[in-house]
Image (cartoon, rainbow, N blue to C red):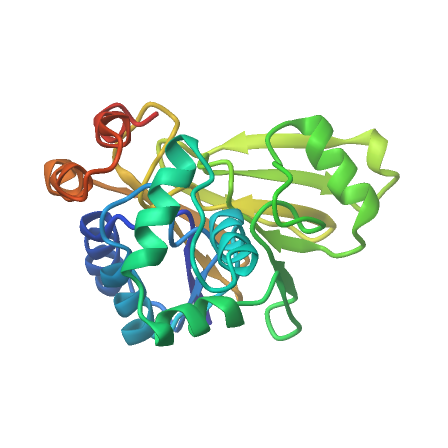
Amino acid sequence: MRLLLLSDIHANAPALEAVLADAAGRGYDRAVMLGDALGYGGNPAEVLARLRELGAECIRGNHEQMGLDLLGRGGGELLGSGGVVGAALEWQFGQLGADDLTWVASWPDGLEDREVGARFRHGTPLSLDTYADSVTAARDAFAGWGGRLGFVGHTHLPGVYAALHAPVGEWVKFQGLSAGGSYLLPPGIRAICNPGSVGQPRDGDPRASYALFDVGRQTFEVVRVAYPVEAAQTAILEAGLPPVLAARLALGR
């Protein structure tokens, strides 16, 4: 079985389409979206429609959680939260129909998959919104979680944190995969794998990032894909969202 792993699409439909076209040529059996389909970008409805069409298994990210929290506090009417994040969420959730809102609200905060032997969650295997962005943070996650394999997003940085099946403090390493490439998970290794961001990379490379995981071979492969950044920028500006959200896409920041 091969898994297509998507995360942090952030309502960037051009990036998602480029990723799906590339992944179709490589082949996969299941698609899992690791959170933050929404937030920042100009194509929220289009991205959700594409994920539905794909039959992707979606888990909740912090941006979905924030948007749903805003709706709940407003009694069904979205309240502004201020700042760039709030501006994007207010506009995006106002664009979504009732069916989309119900679907997003149904996304679980994490998923345990016995067939794959993995936990899918947005931030770390233990948290929706904590960042697995350092060896220290990864060590804390390994210490509090007994599983072998976790797939997460949230940092927008592709890579693998790995630990031996031994006292956690003894050995934790990070392998960055910003340029793409494969990581083989040997027996005796515990790993937290991040495919990077489809729609808003933050490693200085504007290309979309996604991953494929081969369950039988235990290989995690990150792929970088060029996409029409200008189209995503135009969608943001035409929506009246803060221009900084468009500018950062060209910088990969």
> Total marks drawn?
0
Residue 55 locus on image (x, y percent): 36, 76
Nearest the camera: 97 or 33? 97
Residue 125 locus on image (x, y percent): 67, 51
41 relative to 34, above or below: above
Q: Residue at x 35, y 25 (%)?
A: 253
In the displayed structure image, the side of residue 58 where residue 96 appears, left or right: left
Nearest the camera: 241 or 115? 241
233 relative to 146, above or below: above
In the displayed structure image, the side of residue 209 where residue 137 appears, left or right: right
In the displayed structure image, the side of residue 221 where residue 75 appears, left or right: right
Picture quarter containing residue 245?
Answer: top left
252 relative to 72, above or below: above
196 relative to 102, above or below: above
Residue 150 locus on image (x, y percent): 63, 53
Picture quarter containing residue 117?
Answer: bottom right
Residue 152 locus on image (x, y percent): 56, 49
Q: Residue at x 45, y 48 (%)?
A: 79
Is residue 151 shown to the viewer in this render?
yes
Q: Residue at x 26, y 48 (%)?
A: 12
Is residue 10 shown to the viewer in this render?
no
Q: Residue at x 30, y 49 (%)?
A: 91
Nearest the camera: 105 or 47? 105
